Image (cartoon, grey):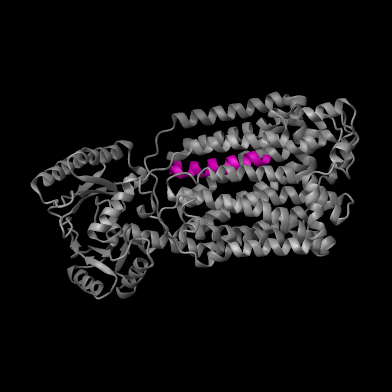
Amino acid sequence: MATFLYKLGRTAFRRRRLVALLWVALLAIAGIGAATASTPTSSSFSIPGTEAQRAFDLLEERFPGAGADGATARVVFKAPEGQKMTDPAHKAVVEETVAALRSGSDQIVQVTDPYTAHAVSQNGSTAYVSVSYKVNAMELTDETREALTRAGLGAQGKGLTVEVGGDALQSMPEQGASEAIGIVLAGIVLVITFGSLVAAGLPLLTAVIGVGIGVSAITALANVLDLGTTTSTLASMIGLAVGIDYALFIVSRYRAELAEGRAKEDAAGRAVGTAGSAVVFAGLTVVIALVGLAVVNIPMLTKMGFAAAGTVVIAVLIALTLIPALLGFAGDKVVSRGQRKAAKSGEGAAEVSGKPNGGTRWARFVIRRPLMVLIVGVLGLGAIAVPAASLEMGLPDDGVKPTSTTERRAYDTLSDGFGPGFNGPLLVVVDGDKTTADRTVSTIKGLGGWAAVTPATPNKAGDAAMITVVPKDRPSSAATENLVHDIRDATGDDVLVTGATAMNIDFSQKMNDALVPYLALVVGLAFVLLTLVFRSVLVPLKAALGFLLSVVAALGAVVAVFQWGWLGGLFGVEQTGPIMSMMPIFMVGVVFGLAMDYEVFLVTRMREAYVHGKRPGEAIVTGFRHSARVVTAAAVIMIAVFSGFIGMDDQMVKMIGFGLAAAVLFDAFVVRMAIVPAVLALLGRKAWWLPKWLDRILPNVDVEGEGLAESAGAPGAAKPDLVKA
């Protein structure tokens, strides 16, 4: 592989104008496709195999046009102290609002009048208007949301406190500001790392081009493939992360090859042949992690995974072709001013590269005290991971949003007026006649944990009915989850429980059930891949175990902050609650890819030195001397990018940002920088052991670039010193 990539890198360097033109043309084509594509008409969300989904399907069949799985909203009214919502003046305001809502959008199925629907609290202080829509929250138009907000604001200045809640207000958070901050921080880190604006600009430029092509392609195909807005968000986040990383690795290796005295074209070829091989395998691990989301069997997640994987493939191809082409345009400017002066003054490359740097000093420290470093690293992450044992999964509701939002204030007002369970009613669907429905109501009333149970509402044919059950506790509580299970256990197969709360419970359970198979698939395939790369059994095993340790530690930190409330004020957590059900699998998929990036790039350089004759300890030092600075820069960039999301108001986005930043911090600086060299130092030559029978079976992918020795006499190339390389 190294030889093929070497030739590819040299060809891209020589034909740089053609390569650059092809990528620009591809970006233009994708952009035109995105600009001319029709707006997606749907973004369906389903959870096959769950009771909540079967209930929605039954409602669709027996109650056509009811919008059972559509978005909902509640406009909540609270009268001033000492007054009641039944007062004539307040009643008139509510009726005006109801009329405005009914005429505000053609996506509305029903708007209830609180005075006929018994939606006034017992003390008369609070009332609410329920609004149901034909489509889910992601399919609501901006005009529909504006009509809802406008109706609430219209009643606001008429003596009442008015708040609007429900998933109808749900929208994807604006990502532009966070991405811009991340790119700026990445630029600062790259300038510090390379000491050259040109070298720093190349990874940013190519990452933006890759993300632009990927996201534009997703937008162009969104309507055809039924892709939601979250798909492009995930693809953008992952594409930006790996795009910067991969370009950073190759530019860094190119500069190292120049420092060895090689000609520019040969240096570009060798950078792609060696670092590019690491990029290919690192990219494959990310693709495996993202495509593996199909194991969960949730169509939306599967599409998100495949789309993001496509963006990663684009990032790899750009790193292998566009980066060497741009290096050809950059000339000497890709090297820092200090290095150019050193080259002109005749200082040897060996002197420059042989000078101990921070990575060298740290590696020597770890080699001298490997057991101590290993124990401190494992115990430290183990202690942080302890809270993960108390992980409670669910989907955060409006109750965890900041008190500055109208959704949170509507949630609190409803809780005060009607009880906390009113924010998450359960919808029980009976597949049977009136007798079966009445029997179901009696059965539910015999259970505990409910605050209200409505009479059954049959359909026109009389062969199905709906029952609304209001829990006593808030939607995300364990008591409400127990109530859902109790109803399901106490009733027959012809009774199904659904609604947003039940759907969240089923979604969490499905994610929980899929976690072990997903881990087995992703880690198993990556183990095989890393065995090919490192030609070792113990190194991939250590990589996988270290990754699991960092992810569990990150989950522990997330539980401590968002579920227990530790340091919650520091991170803007106003209300603790369950951890988002997608969080463990999402963290495994994203962090695994980034962790393997760092593992492959750091350890392949050690493997390269070991294969070329250095002792195990010297190989570790060599790997750190060449790679520690680059891996550190890549990790700092990712931490900065993810940390930018912590400041957002949306609790789910805040949680994702915090979790990913913590996971990268633990994995890059504790696992890869401390535990990995400590374990390798303790294992010595055994680290690179591979059974002879397995060695014969495995193909030689030549990541270390042994095959490049034959190109030593290539035209225009300086004689290479493979021990130094």
Q: Is residue 632 magenta?
A: no
Magenta residues span: 224-246
Residue at the outermost front position: 82
Image height of 91 relative to 377, above or below: above
207 horizontally vs 353: left or right = left
In the rendering, at what x and y percent does residue 369 appear? 80, 60
Residue located 29% across and 73% down the image: 491
Image height of 625 relative to 501, above or below: above
In the rendering, at what x and y percent does residue 360 appear? 81, 48
Q: Is residue 232 magenta?
A: yes
Residue located 78% across and 59% down the image: 680
Q: Quadrant of residue 465?
A: bottom left
In the rendering, at what x and y percent does residue 294 appear? 52, 55
The answer to whether residue 130 of the structure is visible from this angle is yes
Q: Quadrant of the C terminus?
A: top right
Q: Quadrant of the N terminus?
A: top right
486 or 570, nearer to the observer: 570
**Number of marks in the rendered image:** 0
403 or 250, nearer to the observer: 403
The answer to whether residue 537 of the structure is visible from this angle is no
Image height of 410 relative to 516, above or below: above
Residue located 37% across and 59% down the image: 503
In the rendering, at what x and y percent does residue 128 appear? 21, 51
